[in-house]
Image (cartoon, rainbow, N blue to C red):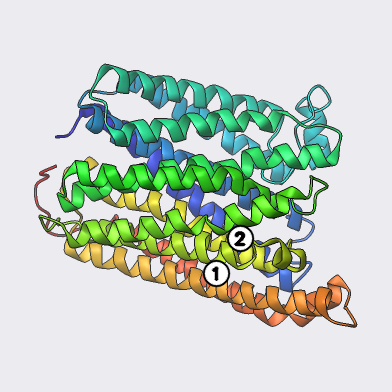
Amino acid sequence: MQYKSQAVAKPYFIAAIGLFIGQIIFGLIMGMQYVVGDFLFPEIPFNVARMVHTNLLIVWLLFGFMGAAYYMVPEESETELYSPKLAIALFWVFLIAGALTVLGYLFVPYATLAQMTGNDLLATMGREFLEQPLPTKLGIVVVALAFLFNITMTVLKGRKTAISTVLLLGLWGLAIFFLFSFYNPHNLVKDKYYWWWVVHLWVEGVWELILGALLAFVLIKVTGVDREVIEKWLYVIITLTLVTGIIGTGHHYYWIGAPDYWQWWGSIFSALEPIPFFAMTVFAFNMVNRRRREHPNKAAVLWALGTGVMAFLGAGVWGFLHTLAPVNYYTHGSQITAAHGHMAFYGAYVMVVLTLISYAMPILRGRAANSNKAQVFEMWSFWLMTVAMVFITLFLTAAGILQVWLQRVSDTPMSFMATQDQVALFYWMREWAGVMFFIGLVVYVISFFIKGETKATTQ
């Protein structure tokens, strides 16, 4: 059954894809600057391109999560959204604040931006991923709390399910751990210690709960497997996630001045972190194999299966490659980290948001699924983007291994810049793989505009 208020998800999904395009464009600019150092300089320096690239990633995924919640929760709760008007108002506040922040990065020197936005009153700027000016951070808190109020009130007045409970736990965790972005101690060790409470406990903690809930929701819809079966899998996955992810934060504490027991705790528990991702892969394939109906939206099923596989490879396998302290001693901060980061973000979070959009957007437009022709385009986009991301990861991994050998292991270690010259070929290959990824994203957008025969919605 469809609920009228689910329509508020549509602008969130559209904005998410628009910002995703912007993120990839700035990723391509950065990739070119790796090999042509003065590309677009001084108009877009590397540090600015990197801020925009990473901040757009965070913001568009948040738009995707919010849109997904606004679509899912009315259906899970079997009631209309508490306040659709609040949802639309928050959309415009978040979009305008995000756009102004990006424009600030691009057109105002960062130090000047810090002075203009009250960083001297409460210093929160200048840290990786948390570069947002103080007003933007405060705006994110206000938007997140109002969004959570809207979602929580909807759940409270309707049916309570395991999926909506796990989603709420993940979303509240997201908001609570973001508050540590306001804590910026002068001591660099304490600064990094608590900085990871935002960054790690988001992407290797509460975001995984959101991922599990979104995947479970789509699998129920496209397979017809009993809710009880899927919910049992979900409980197992989130338990493994929280046990390994929270203590696994220690793999960031190896070399920052924290006590040395973190080398044991971080190594042991982060080595277990691939287990929930493997469970998620088995879960997705198991549910599809046990399906009791053939859903017309084949593209959404493909995205769901791809999420499990790529999340396991990117977050699980590539995370494990350099997570043990004796290995990380040589590899930390290298291109191996970048390889893991790219595939993990794409596999776990980009793909699950695209899964939800792929499933929900046709229904929001009055059909059970896009036309066969449109789905062929969408599935082409899936393979173009996914294969491109595999190549990006492999090229960055090769660059990282060579970088570690030349710069850190060799008996005659080379300087950083001399090493960069030696791995430039892999950077060029990564850039071309990035172009392939961008083409896949363009094909994905085109798929939504392709007409054809469609069936009336049945969901």
Residue 345 drawn above or below residue 139: below
Query: Which residue corresponds to mark 2?
Result: 27
Q: Are marks 2 and 1 in contact (CB under 8 Å)?
A: yes
Which residue shows up at 70% across the image and 43% down it?
105
52 left or right of 126? left
Ranked by sequence position, the earlier of labels 2 and 1 is 2
188 left or right of 221? right
Viewer-closest of 173 and 106: 173
257 left or right of 22? right
On the image, the x and y values in percent for residue 141 come to 57, 25
Number of numbered discs visible in the structure rendering: 2
On the image, the x and y values in percent for residue 380 come to 33, 70
Amino acid carrying label 1: it is Gly
- Identify the secondary structure beneath mark 2: helix
Q: Quadrant of residue 332?
A: bottom right
91 left or right of 295? right
Q: Is residue 14 visible?
A: no
Which residue shows up at 56% across the image and 71% down it?
392
Which residue shows up at 12% across the image and 58% down it?
294
Q: Quarter holding the N terminus?
A: top left
Amino acid carrying label 2: it is Gly
Give residue 434's mark. Answer: 1
Which residue shows up at 42% across the image and 19% down it?
149
Q: Quarter holding the C terminus?
A: top left
Residue 96 drawn above or below residue 205: above
Mark 1 nearby-residue class (10 Å; few <14, some 14–19, many ≥20):
many
Residue 47 drawn above or below residue 66: below
